[in-house]
Image: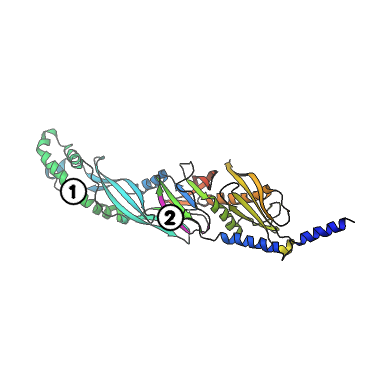
Amino acid sequence: MPTAPLSAGLLAVAGLWLAGCGACQQVAAHRDAFRSEMNRAAPDGAPHIRLAIPGAMVEGWTRKAISRLPDVPVNLPGLGDLSRYVDALGLAPRRMRVALDRGDSARFDLDLDVKSGGRALFGLQLGAVAPVRYDAKKGTLQIALRADMFEKIAPRIDDGAVDRLSSALLSPVPSMLRGTLRPTAQRVAREGVAYLAAQAYGLLRRQVLTPLGELARFEFALPDVPLQGLALATEGGQWVVDARLPFSAAGLPTGRMGKSSGLQMAVSTQALAQLGNWAMGRGEIPARYTREGKAAKGGEFEAGFGWQSGARPLKVHLWTAEVPQTGICLHARAGADPRVSLKQGKLSVGFDNGTIEEMTGPPLISSALGLMGISTEAFAFTRTLATKTKIKLGNDSVGVEVKGLELSGDMLSIDLAAGGAPGS
């Protein structure tokens, strides 16, 4: 019968893919090379993950910090006959600015108003430098500003300070006496400005700064990912936290975030794929699948994610997991153009131009879309990671929730909204 030779031929062909054959060695070598590639040195020094914190959020934090500083009364020397007319002067904190120096320290400039009768006459300035500390064990980046870090610097004396102080001193004086007391007011104003420039720091330190202890704290915590390092920078009025991962993935495109002006996270798509592989190794997302791309604890195949710039950048690999169990040696690679969106809180992932690009072994897999669906796990995992971001501004711990996703080129942009429970 003709079927006997045909059956024998099919068995012979199938036998080519059994354990120990050349194809099995080829599949195993490909899988091992893929796994080891992830641990290679990254091709650039760009960050893999970036969190952009709006300037308005930082300013809100600094406003809260200086709101803790009380006004300090000041007695000017040498008032003489003016003393009966002069309202008490005071030093009142007005604004605090933050500038980052080389990413390893932050400069805090505290502006003070010299006030009389509730009216600002001129300003002074103090400065502090606080180190930016990275805790690799906890995966946190923090700046702790103690009030006693402020130091005396060259005071910022506004133009016209002497004239304004002189006018303020004469203002409550009866008009008939102003001409007589004007020289005294001008002398006291000149000496008073010099006195405040010299003594403001000492007054504040004794009465305000030292007793307060820690004035404010900024702390950023990434979720549980394998961090290689964190850095803090300023860019376009925002605070930017950059994270490097110990992967071979290319970093984020230079100087480009999404369209949002709010709180935002960006992830390199190559890093996203390798985070997916890392998560599978930890058992956080399924690693074993059937030939139809369905997650199964004892699935015949194990998966891997990749990303290559160009056409069909998202890649999904499937390799035989246990050859003796399946009797099949197989490697398949599919590629597609992914689409992601968030609608009413639900993640939507789609694929265009899905194609089986490479096959080693028997043609058991015919649908690229079946394989591409495996990658939805990586997108869902990245979204979950974003919600575990924690930000501490002053005494307020801020959680975030995902409001939008956009995939553009080699970057996944995640729009975040502050206000969720931290770590939720």
Residue 195 in the image: x percent, y percent?
Answer: 18, 49
Residue 183 vs residue 271: left or right?
A: left
Q: Quadrant of residue 157?
A: top left
Give the vertical position of 7 relative to 190 (above or below). Answer: below
Residue 7 in the image: x percent, y percent?
Answer: 84, 58
Query: Which residue lies most toward the left here?
Result: 180
Question: Which amino acid lies under the numbered mark 1 shown in the image of this protein?
Answer: Ala
Seen at 13% across and 47% down, the residue is 78
| Disc 1 secondary structure class | helix
Seen at 27% across and 52% down, the residue is 204
Residue 303 in the image: x percent, y percent?
Answer: 64, 56
Question: Which amino acid lies under the numbered mark 2 shown in the image of this protein?
Answer: Ala
The number of numbered discs placed on residues in the rendered structure image is 2
Marker disc for residue 194: 1
Q: Would you name the residue on which mark 2 appears?
A: 231
CA–CA distance between discs 2 and 1? 41 Å
Residue 410 vs residue 92: left or right?
A: right
Which of the marked residues, 2 or 1, is nearer the chain's N terminus? 1
Residue 28 in the image: x percent, y percent?
Answer: 66, 62
Residue interval drawn in magenta: 221-233
State yes or no: residue 229 in magenta: yes
Give the vertical position of 375 relative to 12 (above or below). Answer: above
Few, some or many C-alpha atoms within 10 Å of disc 1 (few <14, some 14-19, many ≥20)? some
Residue 222 vs residue 35: left or right?
A: left
Query: Which residue lies most toward the right here?
Result: 1
Residue 53 vs residue 320: left or right?
A: left
